[in-house]
């Protein structure tokens, strides 16, 4: 705790506040639900599952081409996962060799590392005068500008598509309930607003920052969780075999659906244990106190930056027996069902907890189940370091896997 929270405020969702944050939190939550990111079944949820499975199988097909060698699965995983997110957010996807897509992927990989290193400037602003931090600031500013240019082009494409579909050159006659992706929904949501004060919250600056938050947070956190999952599966061969056996017995080689999860306790627990032992955001997203308060005798001034130390909760020996051990069965109770501890908070807590939690669960469960049904994984180096490196996210060191096709 400490520092002035004002240094973090900006447009978008992650670091916005007040009416701006409330309005766009509501909008984002409702939009993701509209696309099927909800625990409640229905047509849209099934469509989302189908889209995710389609791209998980695309990963399987692409990896099949390199199966005779020790491979880095991350590029293929990033493309397949990112293609789903691109369709949801931008309404388009790109081929593996598309230059714009390659640039966006590189930015997704390097951006969080730079932002993580830049974090101390929130507490020690004079760091910005040091060469290391000046270079980071330059990287962030340059790529922020280029990213916004790209997003404006994508926005223009979707506006033209809305007009073409409606057979008009104006948005005035477009059906505001027809949004097919996040960009279209933002444009149409603005049209619905009659209160000018609320309408102003849907400005161009907010638009591009919100797109950056949704795209960046979705791809970075989910991909990182998948990277950790397959690393721990490769490190723990017995658990990998047991999880695959459960998948085979329950699914009988058919693709999984979210309705199957309750019948796959060990598989579900293996995903949960990955998120416990290596939380993607171990230091948590900074919050701020909107008024002075007291917590257990400590005075917290108004405007204080407050960070929930997720790592401490997930690695607390008072809560978890042998917390450094990868043990999915810690999530399975005496009745053989999955049971989560209140200290397990992979999606954060409070009003700012992850707005896309259910969609993230769908990505994780459907990608991991599909891939484990088709391949086994092992490491040549059984002592590979699993501590990782921390930027904004805690990411595993680069690794290659020995991949074998399941007959």
Image: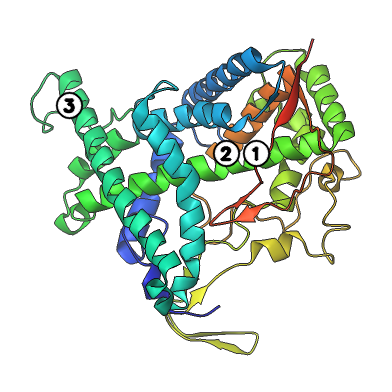
Image: 91 above or below 149: above
How many numbered marks are there?
3
Report the mark closest to the observer, 2 or 3. 2
Task: From the viewer's perspective, tell me whether residue 27 is left or right of residue 85.
Answer: left
Which quadrant, please, contains the C terminus?
Answer: top right
Task: From the viewer's perspective, tell me whether residue 81 is left or right of residue 296.
Answer: left
Callout 2 touching callout 1 (CB < 8 Å)? yes
Residue 290 can be seen in this image: no
Q: Give the camera-side residue of 321 and 68.
A: 68
Q: What is the spatial separation of the Cα atoms under label 2 and label 3, in whole angstroms?
A: 31 Å
Q: Which residue sits at x=58%, y=16%?
A: 62
Q: Residues within 10 Å of mark 1 (few under 14, many from 20)?
A: many
Which quadrant, please, contains the N terminus?
Answer: bottom right
Q: Position of residue 178 (x, y in %)?
A: 28, 27
Quarter of the image for residue 174 reads top left
Q: Which residue sits at x=47%, y=86%?
A: 301
Q: Which mark is residue 160?
A: 3
Q: Give the camera-side residue of 302 and 242.
A: 242
Question: Which residue has dot 1 on it?
Answer: 227
Disc on the earlier residue, 2 or 3: 3
Q: Give the camera-side residue of 44 and 187.
A: 187
Q: What is the spatial separation of the Cα atoms under label 2 and label 1, in whole angstroms?
A: 6 Å
Q: Secondary structure at mark 3?
A: helix
Q: Secondary structure at mark 2?
A: helix
Question: Which residue has dot 2 on it?
Answer: 223
Q: Residues within 10 Å of mark 2 (few under 14, many from 20)?
A: many
Q: Position of residue 199 (x, y in %)?
A: 19, 52
Q: Secondary structure at mark 1?
A: helix
Q: What is the spatial separation of the Cα atoms under label 3 and label 1, in whole angstroms?
A: 37 Å
Q: Which residue sits at x=49%, y=21%?
A: 47
Image: 31 above or below 368: below
Quarter of the image for residue 310 reads bottom right
């Amino acid at each position: 705790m400490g520092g002035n929270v004002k240094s973090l405020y900006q447009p978008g969702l992650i670091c916005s506040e007040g009416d701006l944050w409330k309005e766009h939190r509501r909008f984002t939550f409702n939009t993701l639900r509209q696309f099927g990111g909800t625990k409640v079944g229905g047509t849209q949820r099934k469509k989302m599952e189908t889209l995710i499975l389609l791209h998980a199988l695309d990963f399987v097909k692409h990896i099949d081409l390199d199966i005779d060698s020790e491979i880095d699965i991350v590029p293929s995983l990033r493309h397949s996962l990112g293609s789903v997110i691109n369709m949801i957010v931008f309404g388009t996807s790109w081929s593996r060799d598309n230059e714009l897509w390659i640039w966006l992927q590189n930015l997704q990989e390097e951006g969080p590392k730079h932002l993580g290193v830049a974090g101390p400037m929130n507490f020690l602003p004079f760091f910005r005068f040091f060469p290391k931090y000046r270079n980071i600031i330059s990287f962030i500013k340059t790529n922020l500008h280029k990213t916004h240019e790209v997003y404006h082009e994508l926005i223009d494409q979707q506006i033209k598509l809305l007009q073409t579909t409606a057979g008009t050159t104006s948005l005035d006659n477009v059906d505001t309930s027809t949004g097919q992706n996040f960009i279209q929904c933002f444009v149409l949501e603005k049209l619905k607003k009659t209160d000018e004060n609320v309408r102003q919250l849907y400005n161009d600056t907010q638009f591009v920052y919100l797109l950056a938050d949704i795209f960046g947070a979705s791809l970075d956190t989910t991909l990182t969780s998948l990277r950790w999952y397959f690393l721990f599966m490769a490190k723990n061969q017995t658990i990998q075999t047991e999880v695959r056996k459960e998948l085979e017995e329950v699914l009988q080689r058919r693709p999984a659906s979210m309705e199957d999860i309750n019948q796959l306790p060990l598989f579900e627990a293996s995903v949960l244990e990955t998120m416990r032992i290596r939380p993607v955001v171990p230091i948590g997203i900074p919050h701020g106190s909107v008024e002075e308060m007291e917590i257990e005798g400590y005075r917290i001034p108004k405007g204080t930056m407050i960070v929930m130390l997720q790592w401490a909760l997930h690695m607390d020996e008072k809560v978890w027996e042998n917390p450094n051990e990868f043990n999915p069965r810690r999530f399975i109770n005496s009745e053989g069902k999955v049971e989560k501890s209140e200290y397990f908070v992979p999606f954060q807590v409070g009003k700012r907890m992850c707005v896309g939690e259910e969609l993230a669960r769908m990505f994780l469960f459907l990608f991991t189940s599909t891939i484990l049904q088709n391949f086994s994984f092992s490491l040549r180096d059984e002592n590979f370091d699993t501590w990782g490196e921390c930027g904004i996210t805690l990411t595993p060191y680069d690794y290659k896997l020995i991949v074998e096709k399941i007959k």
